[in-house]
Amino acid sequence: MALCSRRLLFGPQLELLLILTFVFVRNPTFPQVTYAQINAIFSPLQSTDAPGAAVLVVRNGQPVFRKGYGVTDLRTRHDIDPSTNFRLASFTKQFTAMCIMLLVHDGKLHYEDHLTDIFPEFPAYGKTITVRQILNHTSGLPDYEDLWTNLHPNTPDEQVPQIHDVDVLKLLEQQTAGKFPAGSKWEYSNSGYVMLGLIVEKVSGKPFGQFLHDRIFVPLQMTNTLAYEKGKNEVPHRAYGHTKEKDGWRETDQSSTSATLGDGGIYTSIDDLAKWDRALREHTLLSASEMQPALTPAQPTAGPAKDEKGEPVSYGSGWFLDPYKGHKRMWHDGETRGFRTTIQRFTDDGLTIIILANRTDIDPKEFAVKVADLYLK
């Protein structure tokens, strides 16, 4: 560790000041990065009257940068800080996958179990869909978003009723076939992760949010993290989503698909996510070998996995696994009405970058890779 002053040894206040001023790099082959360098990347988000973001950078297991920018909402104008809770959107999927892996650990579920083994009333096309295929987006389950929209044609989203997990199950049970034979192709599926949440409920006998609470949030002391269900619980220290328009900002916090849980329903803060990152690094919940399904890319039978643009994609269980500039990486973005989020974990480099934003005019991943570029020379 590089020490910036001998006075670091004299008193906790001075030590804290120096920690906030400098990033200590244990591996001398990586450059020193200052607090000011990181802060400069996010300085355009600093505001007392606009939504913004919370940023966490962890280096070699230590949080070296944690700061909020902007306000939680335009009514109270409370500052965003490290304890502010944001809707994670698809960032949630890694937690849903962890729930499934915990049930496998418990011996209550197997990756090769079929959808109809768990839901016997599910249509025949579910007989060929395995839990593993749902986890890695090769299940072919139809898009619930499209199905729900088709039930409310020519209706503005604000007027479309919110769909819940049980509604997704009913919609999928009304279909007679998947989008493609299970296992043959890769296609990102929110329907699949809603179903995984329902599988957790069916197999564990607990509501999905309760299972998350009991098996992940409580053991990791993520005390302000929850799966939000309107009318059942409340989000503390909550940021509200916003969209930028010609005449300013508009609060756009919920959509017709904001009430589903397994694919995007968790609210949390960068302070709690620091605990999640530590648990992943230290294998607190599962051993390294038990985590391998999350880190094993899908291999569709019809050819290499590709995204909707035809670009190669690597996805395990709840994690994208595409490297960045030759550096091993596990990552996921979240995007929903009013929120944008990302987690970028460079596991071999001891670097994690997490950005939670309550505005839709920025791409957190672009900010995250700018931070990564400071370290990954």
Image: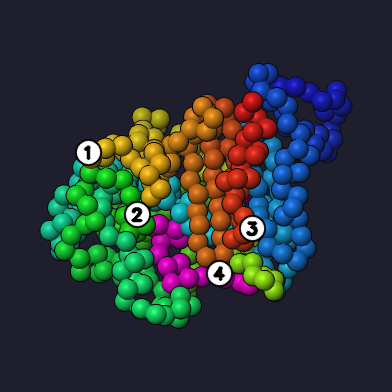
For label 2, the residue is 189
Instruction: State the SS at label 3.
Output: loop
Q: Earlier in the sequence, mark 1 or mark 2?
A: 2
Residue that label 3 marks: 84
- The answer to whether residue 143 is magenta is no
* Nearest to N terminus: mark 3 or mark 1: 3
User: Which kind of residue does numbered mark 1 sit on?
Assistant: Thr
Q: Which badge, 2 or 3, is on the more N-terminal residue? A: 3
Contact (Cβ within 8 Å) of mark 4 with mark 3:
no
Residue 71, position in %: x, y?
Answer: 71, 63
Q: What is the spatial separation of the Cα atoms under label 2 and label 3, in whole angstroms? A: 29 Å
Question: How far separated are the C-alphas under marks 2 and 4?
Answer: 22 Å
Task: Judge by depth and name the residue closer to the eye, 63 or 172.
Answer: 172
Q: Is residue 252 magenta?
A: yes
Q: Amino acid at mark 3?
A: Thr
Mark 4 falls on what kind of element?
loop
Left or right, 63 with respect to 153, comes to right
| Left or right position of 252 against 38 | left
Categorize mark 1 by other alpha carbons within 10 Å: few (<14), some (14-19), many (20+): some
Label 4 crowding class (10 Å Cα cut-off): few <14, some 14-19, many 20+?
A: some
| Cα distance in 3D space between marks 3 and 1 | 43 Å
What is the span of residues highlighted in magenta in the rendered image? Answer: 250-271
In primary-sequence order, the first of circles 4 and 3 is 3
- The N terminus lies in which quarter of the figure? top right
Marks 2,3: beta carbons within 8 A? no
Identify the element where label 2 is drawn. loop
Disc 2 crowd rating (10 Å Cα; few below 14, some 14-19, many 20+) is many
> In this rendering, does residue 353 appear at all?
yes
Identify the mark nearer the N-term, 2 or 4. Answer: 2
Left or right of residue 93: residue 83: right
Left or right of 76, for residue 274: left
Give the CA distance from mark 1 to mark 2. 18 Å
